[in-house]
Amino acid sequence: MTAPGRPAPRPAPVPAAALPAAAFRGRARVRFGDCDPAGIVFFPNWFTIAHGTVEDLFRERLRIDFHDLHGARGIGTGFVHAAATFMRPGLMGDEVAITPLVRRVGRASYALDVHLHRGEEELARLDLVTATTSLARRASVPVPDDLRAALLRYGAECGTVAGPETAP
Amino acid sequence: MTAPGRPAPRPAPVPAAALPAAAFRGRARVRFGDCDPAGIVFFPNWFTIAHGTVEDLFRERLRIDFHDLHGARGIGTGFVHAAATFMRPGLMGDEVAITPLVRRVGRASYALDVHLHRGEEELARLDLVTATTSLARRASVPVPDDLRAALLRYGAECGTVAGPETAP
Amino acid sequence: MTAPGRPAPRPAPVPAAALPAAAFRGRARVRFGDCDPAGIVFFPNWFTIAHGTVEDLFRERLRIDFHDLHGARGIGTGFVHAAATFMRPGLMGDEVAITPLVRRVGRASYALDVHLHRGEEELARLDLVTATTSLARRASVPVPDDLRAALLRYGAECGTVAGPETAP
Amino acid sequence: MTAPGRPAPRPAPVPAAALPAAAFRGRARVRFGDCDPAGIVFFPNWFTIAHGTVEDLFRERLRIDFHDLHGARGIGTGFVHAAATFMRPGLMGDEVAITPLVRRVGRASYALDVHLHRGEEELARLDLVTATTSLARRASVPVPDDLRAALLRYGAECGTVAGPETAP
């Protein structure tokens, strides 16, 4: 019923300067309302913050209109997996740099790593796997060609994806 | 910089009836405001929904006052890892059963699996690892004795934790 | 540019027992993640909590399927006004009773008062005005007949709406 | 039990250009996760977005450290009233300008108007009344002198507050 006991190895923090210079970077300020009674970011809000930067990546770097994708084109970008390793707590007022990197582009899904830093200190690392779907049929569809090309190009610019893959 | 390519194996859905009869079960209704323009639960909200049930588990089954723990006792329950596998989308109005199971109790952390079902259909599986901290010192502290005992007892009742562990 | 200085009169708290016995009542637990670093409910979350009960009112008492209304029927229930008077802070773990009352049913809008109580103590009073719209045309449409009838019936049962109105 | 029927007059939208040139302006992007199944901003999120700009106003213009105020100084800024008039729906991807203006500074509370615009079009107008409290005693305290002076100075720069007031 539950996963076998051996947990996945915990990623080690990397300094912001170690990320690819060509990577897209978003910025967000940790808000009062993002934080909980312990005074730190309530953990699901890190996913929300990161997703905002993924939207910016689409618009500003991939040149794919996220709104149009979900609207006129009827393509959903539903998550099939989302994981986070929290390294340091985020505090109210922190300015956070958010760096999304392409790890994999598959036939009908793609995987991003998102690094969140305060200065050089990594606060959290997210692993987001998205499957492309037909919103009308609620069924898996191949990653659209323009999105695939843009993800592969961005991944190549960052040196995080070697080239086109086909599986899974 | 990024994790090696081989992803963790994706857990297979289990029917609600296959979960331990002794497990604690929360209930939540998927709200309009939980859903996104694709009409499905915006993924970080699954973590928020699950955390509500973890709070109920503490109060109703473990008999540990979550508020008092963070208040008078000054113990934080910060997340060091949170992962979700999304199996089926949640839709507005869905009634969801939320079943938290104890997977591991360590020296200064514990791990829960949280299953979210609509009827017998598993929608999402969460893996939440919490570290106990001193809120004043923002430093790791051992899981308090009463919380450890309650988690182990609940885990034993569900058959998901064999007995006391010490590492890590 | 700004409203003239004289503020609207602040409503006085009423005990829960003073609300109509026939009124629909929702229940919610204040969650850790609803609260801010001051340890109290972050104010926008009161609106989210109240909206959950409005959805329940629709399903359980008005017998109008909120999902179907927005889905197959293409009717939006967009807010044109939302106001809250906060009387007492909500604390983590509080169990809150949420009582929505119909104040007005107009041609293309309706107004609800929502009372939030902890025991007999009123914590917040919300004033929510909704306009019915065509989601396809993003334009105002009359309140659908079944919804209008259900709101008036519920209002009459509670004694908060005298009868059919036509304006505005 | 409910407020008398006559609603407060609905404020008319003003173009962004009509706001004081000296006013502080925040910017936010409407996110996928801010929007509901109707494809528009879920209304409580407007309050959250506006509050982010109020935090920026404190830090960047009033030179009051919001974090320090709630932390070391033990002063809470709890809301006693929050109201919004929604004029036009916000859509995913919209870039929104957020303009907070001081309307009133009282003995133990202050009131802000917050205008939200997309280009010249006003989308929403918020009326936020905050009471200063002692977090330790959960009781009203006078607006701290430095905060009062900063609010009055900012209000005077914008021409929205004539001068010091004392009531209420």
Image: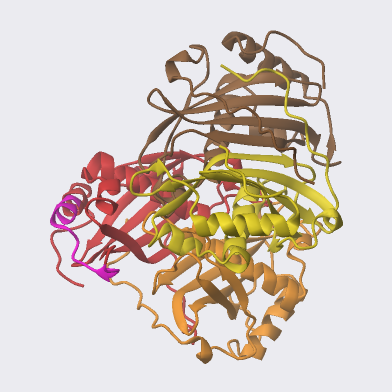
Chain colours: A yellow, B brown, C red, D orange
Q: Position of residue D163 (x, y in %)?
A: 64, 88
Q: Of D8 and B168, which appears nearest the observer?
A: B168
Residue C146 falls within the magenta-colored stretch? yes
Decide: is C63 above or below A28. Answer: above
Q: Position of residue D57 (x, y in %)?
A: 68, 74
Magenta part of the chain: C137-150
Q: Of D148 and A31, which appears nearest the observer?
A: A31
Q: What residue is rendered at 70% in x and 51% in y?
A: D137
Quarter of the image that includes the N terminus of chain A: top right
Horizontal side, residue C104 vs residue C145: left or right: right
Horizontal side, residue C2 vs residue C109: left or right: right
Residue C151 falls within the magenta-colored stretch? no
Q: Of B127 and B54, which appears nearest the observer?
A: B127
Q: What residue is rendered at 48% in x and 85% in y?
A: D120
Q: Position of residue B102 (x, y in %)?
A: 64, 20
Q: What residue is rendered at 37% in x and 37% in y?
A: B94
Residue A40: in sight, yes or no? Answer: yes
Decide: is A92 above or below D59. Answer: above
